[in-house]
Amino acid sequence: MTIQTIDARLIGGPTLQLRYVGLNILTDPTFDEPGAYPGGATLYKTRGPAVSSDEVGRADLVLLSHDQHFDNLDHSGRALLQESGVVLSTPDAAERIPGVIGLTPWQTISVGDVHVTAVPALHGPEGAEALSGVVTGFVLRAADAPVVYVSGDNASVDLVSEIADRVPDIDVAILFAGAANVGRFGDIDLTLNARTAVQTAQRLGEARIVVVHAEDWEHFSETPERLATQFRRAGLTDRLTIPVRGEWFAIG
């Protein structure tokens, strides 16, 4: 049996375009130019998208980890949702945004030939939901295609272990990293840092690791270069891909 490869392109931040089993898929769409986003903690976007939404084209499927933070769904991304096919996210997001389908952890929905399962994620330390809100990850599965895990804004290695136990055949893991930190929980990060990304990779067997959401915003406290160094020291460089913004690459 021949397993298809996946074509992917990093737009910027958490926004990855995937061509998977005939579907044009986007993760957390962000297409604004640089700017400030006031809120409980003001977020500063430092770089715009590498590719315009017009060039990306209509998304058949959007995987939205959550809607409450501008670095995961900015103004342009929110407008894009209304022109997309199926948009999957949390039940909370479905209550706030018309047309969004909310999934609870381990709930599965089929979009074309792709089965999408929501998986748990935690945006910070235990109990973070009260301040950070509920977030979700996803697993994609289709015949003769790699099984893909999209972490969303998850900081919990324990949750990754739970996912790996229930889905032991993950081939590709798209990890949101960068050690996001706005000071809300002191030195505890809101997303994976270099150390916990390595631990996550170790719990995912031989899965190919693709890192996104590690730059383009000021609140990321670690660079992709630091993450690459930690993977090299752990002997995992051969499994790591840090995409070049705007350039297509194959994974699988």
Image (cartoon, rainbow, N blue to C red):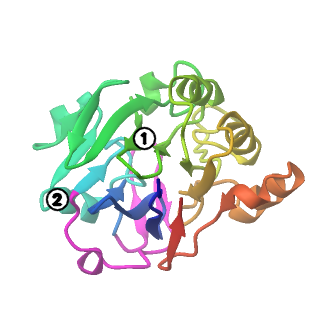
| Magenta residue check for 34 | yes
Q: Which label sits on residue 148?
A: none
Residue 242 at x, y percent in the picture = 63, 65
Q: N-terminal of the two: label 2 or label 1?
A: 1
| Magenta residue check for 53 | yes
For label 2, the crowd category at 10 Å Cα-Cα, with few meaning under 14, some 14 to 19 and many 20 or more, is: some
Residue drawn where x is 33% and y is 53% of the image:
73
Left or right: 159, with 69 as reference point: right
Tell me the chief SS of the magenta region.
loop
Residue drawn where x is 23% and y is 79% of the image:
54
Instruction: Determine whether the residue tagged by mark 1 lies in a helix, strand or loop.
Output: loop
Q: Please report the bounds of the magenta region as a residue range.
A: 32-60
Answer above or below: position of 19 versus 129. Answer: below
Answer above or below: position of 92 versus 72. Answer: above
Determine the CA span between mark 2 and mark 1.
29 Å
Q: Amino acid at mark 1?
A: Gly
Left or right: 37, with 230 as reference point: left
Residue drawn where x is 32% and y is 39% of the image:
116
Q: Residue furthest front?
A: 1
Q: Amino acid at mark 2?
A: Ser
Q: Nearer the viewer, mark 2 or mark 1?
A: 2
For label 1, the crowd category at 10 Å Cα-Cα, with few meaning under 14, some 14 to 19 and many 20 or more, is: few
Answer above or below: position of 68 versus 231. Answer: above
Residue 243 at x, y percent in the picture = 58, 69
Answer above or below: position of 167 versus 56. Answer: above
Q: Which residue is mark 1?
A: 40
Q: Which label sits on residue 84?
A: 2
User: For this rendering, which residue is in front, 41 or 91?
Assistant: 91
